[in-house]
Image (cartoon, rainbow, N blue to C red):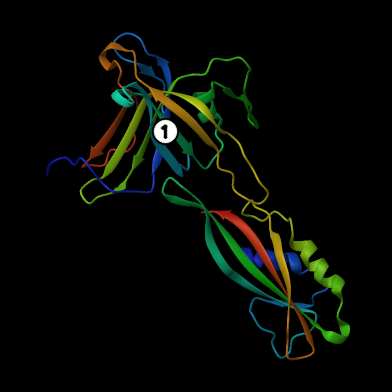
């Protein structure tokens, strides 16, 4: 069977983030994947830069570029390990009974990779895997809570292209898999 | 212990003399009397990773009192022993509503709707 180029989509099944250690040399280097538990909502929106030339009362020319992808994630469990990857906090087990996630002002935002998988697709397609290689958080609600309701943390982020030479300008992959793969165990792929 | 049994155990120490897990008043019931309907509903409350992560269960506690001995404070007392108590599921019981229901006999009937979340 030929590999598919299209599919319907239903639900979202898994989401992981990967701390980016470097984006130099031939390949980017990432730390171990961190599961974003209980992924409930994801998005992928192009961010376009456009310019146009007007003259004689009409648009004579248009030029546009896709320069980044805006994305978001809403998930089900507050996780210090996820915060460490996306905002650069430091989570440590201070005692056997106490873990602290320490957030400092003035720390440069880290870059990270992100990937999610949608497993309910057309017959014959097992996984649709989306990987974004170089992301940075742009906003979100890392902890929001109301009385007698489950909280769902969320964050928004944007992905840009890589600088590492073998992956130059690679921003994201959207992979249609005929066999189940899940989200990548590690990056890069 | 089931969630319904947990709620029953909370109500037991009140002035309610008999409790049964059923939705009716037996002929030989002694009053005040409470019955328990569990569950009234058990709906998905949180989803993620394409799974049900948590559910919310609604239970009903029916409190019956004889009209001539009616004590409104007993309704409040039953609410108080349930509302805000942390169950074995790790979540708190909430009495979300109390309704007075008409009865044919000389009974005063209050139905308490109890809500509690639980992880799947």
Q: Quadrant of the C terminus of chain A?
A: top left
Instruction: Give coordinates of residue B41: x percent, y percent.
Output: 56, 67
**Could you say whether the residue bearing mark 1 is in a helix, strand or loop?**
strand
In the image, A142: left or right of A115?
A: right
Give the chain of mark 1. A
Above or below for B94 versus A39: below
Hey, which quadrant is residue B77 in on the image?
Answer: bottom right
Tag 1: Cα neighbours inside 10 Å, few (<14), some, or many (≥20)?
many
Residue farthest top in this picture: A25
Above or below for A42 versus A137: below
Residue farthest front in this picture: A56
Above or below for A81 versus B93: above
Q: Quadrant of the N terminus of chain A?
A: top left
Above or below for A34 versus B93: above
Instruction: Give coordinates of residue B54: x percent, y percent.
Output: 53, 53
Q: Which sits in the foreground, B77 or A152? A: A152
Q: Which residue is mark 1?
A: A16
Residue farthest left in this picture: A1
Residue at figure coordinates x 26%, y 14% from the top left: A166
Number of disc labels: 1
Q: Which sits in the foreground, A79 or A110? A: A110
Q: Which sits in the foreground, A63 or A69? A: A63
Hey, which quadrant is residue A126 in on the image?
Answer: top left
- Asked if residue A136 shows in the view, the reply is yes
Residue at figure coordinates x 36%, y 28% from the top left: A132
- Asked if residue A185 shows in the view, the reply is no
Instruction: Give coordinates of residue B55: x percent, y percent.
Output: 54, 57
Residue at figure coordinates x 70%, y 59% from the top left: B94
Residue at figure coordinates x 74%, y 59% from the top left: B83
């Amino acid at each position: 069977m030929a590999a598919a180029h299209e599919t319907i989509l239903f639900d979202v099944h898994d989401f992981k983030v990967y701390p980016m250690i470097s984006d130099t040399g031939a390949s980017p280097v990432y730390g171990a994947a961190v599961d974003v538990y209980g992924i409930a909502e994801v998005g992928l929106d192009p961010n376009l830069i456009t310019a146009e030339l007007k003259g004689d009362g009409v648009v004579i020319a248009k030029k546009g570029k896709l320069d980044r992808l805006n994305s978001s994630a809403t998930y089900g469990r507050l996780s210090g390990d996820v915060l460490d990857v996306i905002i650069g906090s430091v989570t440590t087990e201070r005692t056997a009974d106490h873990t602290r996630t320490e957030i400092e002002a003035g720390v440069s935002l880290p870059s990270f990779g992100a990937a999610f998988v949608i497993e309910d697709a057309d017959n014959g397609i097992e996984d649709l895997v989306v990987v974004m290689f170089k992301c940075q958080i742009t906003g979100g609600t890392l902890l929001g809570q109301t009385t007698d309701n489950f909280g769902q943390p969320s964050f928004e982020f944007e992905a840009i292209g890589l600088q590492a030479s073998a992956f130059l300008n690679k921003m994201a992959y959207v992979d249609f898999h005929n066999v189940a793969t899940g989200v990548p165990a590690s990056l890069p792929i | 212990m089931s969630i319904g049994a947990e709620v029953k155990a909370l109500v037991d120490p009140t002035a309610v003399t008999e409790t049964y897990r059923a939705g009716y008043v037996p002929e030989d019931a002694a009053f005040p009397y409470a019955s328990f309907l569990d569950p009234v509903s058990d709906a998905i409350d949180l989803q993620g990773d394409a799974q049900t992560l948590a559910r919310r269960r609604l239970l009903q506690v029916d409190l019956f009192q004889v009209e001539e001995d009616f004590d409104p404070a007993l309704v409040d007392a039953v609410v108080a022993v349930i509302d805000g108590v942390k169950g074995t599921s790790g979540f708190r019981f909430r009495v979300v509503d109390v309704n007075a229901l008409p009865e044919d006999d000389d009974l005063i009937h209050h139905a308490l709707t109890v809500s509690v979340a639980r992880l799947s």
